Image (cartoon, helix red, strand yellow):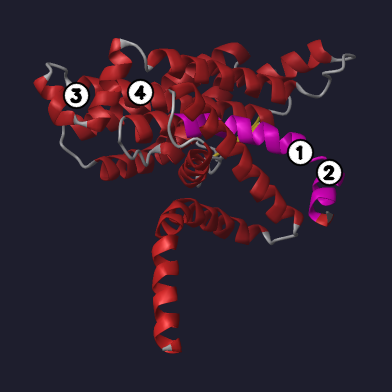
Amino acid sequence: MSIISTIFDLGQLQTVAELGLISSLTVLALFLSYSMLNVCDLSTDGCFTFGAAVGAVVALNGHPYLSIAAAMLAGVLSGFITAILQTVLGIDSLLAGIVVNTGLYSINIAVMKKSSLLNLNSVETVFTMLKGKLAGTFLEGKQTLIIAFIAVVAVVAFLSLFLKTKLGLSIRATGNNPDMVKSSSINPVMTTIIGLCIANSFTALSGCLLAQAQKQAEINIGSGMVTVALASLLIGGVFVKRGKIPFRAIGAVLGAVIFRLVYQIAIGLHMPAFMLKLVSSVIVIIAIAGPYIKSKMPEYIRKAKLKSGKKVG
C-alpha cells in the first residue's frame, strides 16, 4: 500500500499513462520491424532522437502541426538508410542499425544547430494548442494523455489494416520465410525497405511527441529506448502471445504502460537515478527469460523429484 500511495501522492499515474502511451509508439515500431519483419533494428535510439530534434526545430519555427509530419519523414529517411545498408550493401542487420545509430548522433547535433539541447518552453506545440482548448473543461490538464492516446489508436488502426493488405502480407511473409517470398515473385528488398521506413516513422513520431510533451529536445532523449521498447514488446507478448494483429498490437501498448509503471515504482522506492538503467536491464532479462524458465519448470520439478527420491531411497 505504501508504494501505491506514494505514486498517488506524487500524482504520477497520469504521467505513467502518458509516457507509456508515447513510448508505445516505439514499441509498435519494433512490433512491425522485429515481430513482423524479423529484423532487429538497433537504430531505434538515434531515430527516436532524430524525430525529437526535427520536430523541435520545426516547432521552433512556428509550425507545431507540421513538426509531426516532419518528424515522421525523418524517421522514414532513417529507416530507408538502415534498410539500404542491409538489403543493397549486404551489411548485417545488427551492424547496420549500430552504424546508423552512431551516424545519427552527429546528424542530430547538426539538426539541433550544434547544440545538445533545444528549449521548447516558450514555443507553441500540439500540446499547448490543445491545452488552451481544454481550459475550463473536465479534461483540463489532460492534453498530453489525449494526444498520446489518439496517436496510439491511429497507429494501431493503421497496422491492423495495413498488415492485412497485399503489401502488408508480403512484409509478414518476408519475416517468416524470405526464401519462399523470392520464389513467389515478391521482392524482399522492397518489402524490407518499406517495412523499416514505416516502423522508423513511428519511432520518430514517438520522439517528437516526447520532446514536445517535456518541452525540450535533448541529444540523449532516445538513450536506451531500444531496451525499453524491446522489454515492453516482450511484456506485451506475455499477455497476448498469439491472435489477430489488433490484439497483439494492443498487447504491445499494454506492455509499454506496464514497463513505465514498474519504472515508476522503482522511483517511488527512492532508487538512485543511476540505478534506473539497471532496472531497465533487469526488466528485459525477466521478460526474455521468464517464458523460457516457465516452459522448463515442469522439467526442473521432475528432476528435483527424482533427486529427492534417490536421496530418500
Three-letter residue code for mark 3: Pro
> Which callout, 1 or 4, points at the residue further toward the start of the chain?
1
Residue 13 magenta-highlighted: yes
Nearer to the camera, 81 or 260: 260
Cα gap from disc 2 to disc 1, whole angstroms? 7 Å
Q: Which residue is mark 4?
A: 197
Nearer to the camera, 145 or 298: 298
The residue tagged with tag 2: helix, strand or loop? Answer: helix
**Residue lying farthest left?**
183
Cα gap from disc 3 to disc 1, whole angstroms? 43 Å
Query: Which mark is on residue 8?
Result: 2
Three-letter residue code for mark 4: Cys
| On screen, residue 266 above or below 80 | below
Three-letter residue code for mark 2: Phe
Q: Which residue is mark 1?
A: 13
Looking at the rendered image, the quarter that the C terminus falls into is bottom left
10 Å neighbourhood of mark 3: few (<14), some, or many (≥20)?
many
The magenta segment is: 3-28
The residue tagged with tag 4: helix, strand or loop? Answer: helix
Residue 103 position, x and y percent, is 35, 39
Predominant secondary structure, magenta span: helix
> Which callout, 2 or 1, points at the residue further toward the start of the chain?
2
The residue tagged with tag 1: helix, strand or loop? Answer: helix
Three-letter residue code for mark 1: Leu
Residue 227 magenta-highlighted: no
Cα gap from disc 4 to disc 3, whole angstroms? 14 Å
Query: Which mark is on residue 188?
Result: 3
Is mark 2 in CB contact (under 8 Å) with mark 1?
Answer: yes
10 Å neighbourhood of mark 2: few (<14), some, or many (≥20)?
few
Residue 63 visible to an observer of this rendering: no
